[in-house]
Image (spheres, rainbow, N blue to C red):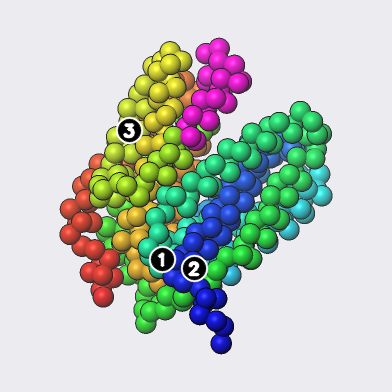
Amino acid sequence: MPPESQIPTAASVKRRFATRLALFYSALFAVSGTHLPFFPVWLKAIGIDAFWIGLINALPALTRFTTLPQVTAIAEKRHAIRGGMIISVLGTAIGFAAVGLQQQPLELFLIYVLTCVMWTPTMPLTDAYALRGVARHGLDYGPLRLWGSAAFAAAALACGYLVDIIAARDLIWIIVAWAVVAVLASLLLQPLDDARHRTTGKQAGKALLRDGGFWAVIASAALIQGSHVAYYTFSAINWQLHGLSGLTIAGLWTLGVIAEIIVFALSPRFSLHPSSLMAIGGLSAVLRWIVTANEPPLALLAIAQLGHGLTFGMTIVGTMNLLVQRVPSHQIARGQGYYAACSGLLGATTSIASGAIYARIGDGLYYVMAAMAAAGALVIWSARHRLIAQPQSEASGG
C-alpha cells in the first residue's frame, strides 16, 4: 500500500485531469489551425484542380451529419469515450499521412473520406469527455476550452510563417505532425468512471430525441453558430475588396480569437442562466452582422470583431453548460453527436446557399446571417422557462 503522502488527493486528480485535457484540446485545435487555412493550399500545390478541391473540402461537413452520430453512439454504448478519442486521433494521423502520399484526385478523395470518418467524431467525443469531467470534478468548461482557441490561432500563425519558408507541397506534413502530437496527448488522458445506466442503446437515443428542451438547445446553437458562415467564408475576400491589407485582415481575425479566449477565461464568473448566455450570443450576432454588412470604418469593424467573444464564445459556453444540465451523463456522447450532426447539416446547407447569395447581393449576405442569429436567439428564449423549470434529474426521468 503506498504511503499516505503518495495517495492522490481529489484536488490533484482534478488538476491532472484539467491539465491533460487542456493539452489534448491544444493539440487537437492545432491540427485544425493548420488544416483549415492551408490544406486547400497544399491541394493546389500538388496539382489538384478547383473542382476536386471543392469536392474534397466538402467531406468533413458531409461526414459530420452522416457517420459521426453513429460513431459517437457506438463509443457511448461501449462506455469507451476516451478509447474512441484515442482511436479517432490515431486514425486521423494515419489518414493524413496516407493523404500526403497521394497526388491523384480520385485516390486522394477516397482516402480523405476515410480520414474524415475518423477525424470528425474527435471533437464531439472530446467535448463529451470534457463535460463528463466537468460534472465529475466540479470544473468549468470555458477555461478548459480556451486552450484550444489559443492553440488554433498560434498554429495558424506559425503555419502561415512557414508557408514562406517551406515548399507548399510539404504543408501536409505539418498537419500530420500535429496529428501525431494529438495522438501522444490522447494517451495521457485519464480514464473517467463509466456512466452506466439501465436505459441504453436505442431507448437512450429515443428518450433524448423526445426531449423538446434538448432540441431547442441544439437548434438554437446551430442557428447562431451557423450565422458565422458568411464571416468564415467571405470576410477575407470581402475585406480585400474594400482595400484592407492581408496583415490588417489577420489582425481582425486575431481580435476575434482573443475576445473568444477572454470569454472562456471569464466564464466561471457568469451568473446568468446558460439559456440567457445563448440568447445574448444570438442577439450580439444580430448586431455584429448588421454592422459588418454596412461597410463600417476600420475602428468600428475592429469593435465588431471583438464581438466574436459574445457571438461565438458565449454561445458555446451557454450550449455546453445546458448540455451538462440537460443531458444525463450516460447519454452525453450521443447528445454531442446529435449536436454536431445538426450543426454540420445546417452549416453545410448555409455554406452552399451563401455562395449564391453573396454572388447576388455581396455584403447583404450578412443580413441573412443576422436573421439566422435572431431565429436562434428566439428559439432558446422561447424554451428558457422549460429549461430552467425542468433540470436534468427530471428531464432524464431520475
Q: Earlier in the sequence, mark 1 or mark 3?
A: 1
Helix, strand or loop at label 3? It is helix
Residue at image mark 3? 284
Q: Is residue 249 magenta?
A: yes
Q: Nearer the viewer, residue 47 or 1?
A: 1
Q: What residue appears at the point 40 percent right and 23 percent down from the top-left corner?
A: 303
Residue at image mark 1? 137
Q: What residue appears at the point 56 percent right and 20 percent down from the top-left corner?
A: 248
Q: Earlier in the sequence, mark 2 or mark 1?
A: 2
In this picture, residue 342 sits left or right of residue 103:
left
Q: CA distance from mark 2 to mark 1?
A: 8 Å
Q: Farthest bottom residue?
A: 1
Q: Nearer the viewer, residue 151 or 212?
A: 151
Under mark 1, the amino acid is: His
Residue at image mark 2? 13
Quick check: 100 above or below 359?
below
Name the chief secondary structure element in magenta.
helix
Quick check: 138 above or below 3?
above
Number of disc labels: 3
Mark nearest the camera among 1 and 3 is 1
Q: Does residue 4 appear in the picture of this structure?
A: yes
Q: CA distance from mark 1 to mark 3?
A: 32 Å
Q: What residue appears at the point 64 percent right and 40 percent down from the top-left corner?
A: 155
Mark nearest the camera among 3 and 2 is 2
Quadrant position of the C terminus in the picture: bottom left
Identify the magenta region: 234-258
Label 2 with label 1: CB-CB less than 8 Å: yes
